[in-house]
Amino acid sequence: MSSFEEKMSITVLLPAGRLPLDIMQKAHDLADRYGLEIYLSTLQNLRLLNVPQSAVAEVKAALVALGADFKAPGKFPIPRICVGKPHCNLGLIDTKELSEKILAKFVGRGKTKAKLKIAISACMLSCSGTKISDIGIIAGRNGYDIFAGGKGGPAPRIGRRIKKEVGEDEVLQTIETLIAFHDSKTGTKQRMIKLLDHPDFPFPEV
Ligand code: SF4
């Protein structure tokens, strides 16, 4: 391996921010072997930094053998979640469970354009950035509020509330409608905020 060899990063998707122990151990072994750094990303994924180009295939194969999935264009976004019930005293729902339901419904769906982020919070404090995500789902005592079009970055914006105190089925239907609308109106990538005032945007503010 040349010291001038190009270095890459590999992002392992971690649904619900959970890191399986075998993947953790393998990442540790690979980091030892190739001198990698391990970065925990703001989207709750595991990123291996400084992977030599010549080792990328081998590193990926070792992780795939343990069931790892990698960030790639077109994949449905893994929701960023707060820790929720029962791990936070304020949590009204088990965020891991809702994230799993969302992924079970949509994970095989291709055609999700880049830049779209989903977040879930188990109470209105929104620790997972639900109001600054393209689609934000916030649990309340009487159901879920859904926000669309939030964003962070240099000009942060709070999302627009498009559903108030709805049930889980409506959460799933709303995500489906929003993703389909985003896909139909987006070339390669676009934040939802740019579509909020489109004449065909499917939901009014509530
Ligand atoms: S959003 Fe609420 S439930 Fe979730 S971690 Fe923060 S305080 Fe706890």
Image (cartoon, helix red, strand yellow):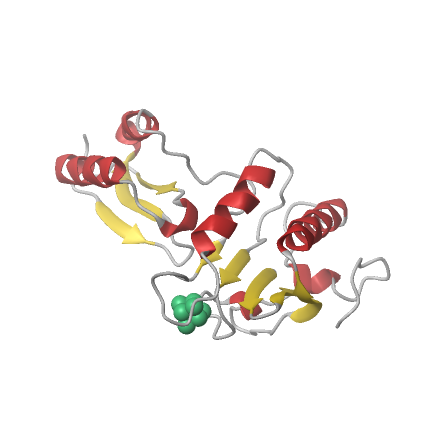
> Most extreme residue toward the left, as rendered?
32
Depth order, front residue of 185/56: 185
Image location of residue 177, percent across then percent down = 73, 49
Residue at image x 42%, y 37%? 70
Quarter of the view holding residue 10: top left
- Count of number-bearing discs: 0
| Residue 17 higher or lower than 11, as above or below | below
> Most extreme residue toward the right, as rendered?
199
**Left or right of 54 in this view: 13:** right
**Left or right of 18 in this view: 3:** left
Image location of residue 16, percent across then percent down = 41, 50
Residue at image x 18%, y 41%? 28
The answer to whether one can see residue 91 in this image is yes
Residue at image x 53%, y 66%? 130
Q: Which quadrant holds the N terminus?
A: top left
Residue at image x 51%, y 51%? 98
Depth order, front residue of 126/51: 126
Image location of residue 24, percent across then percent down = 23, 41
Where in the image, quadrant-wise, is ligand 1 located? Answer: bottom left
Image location of residue 155, percent across then percent down = 56, 74
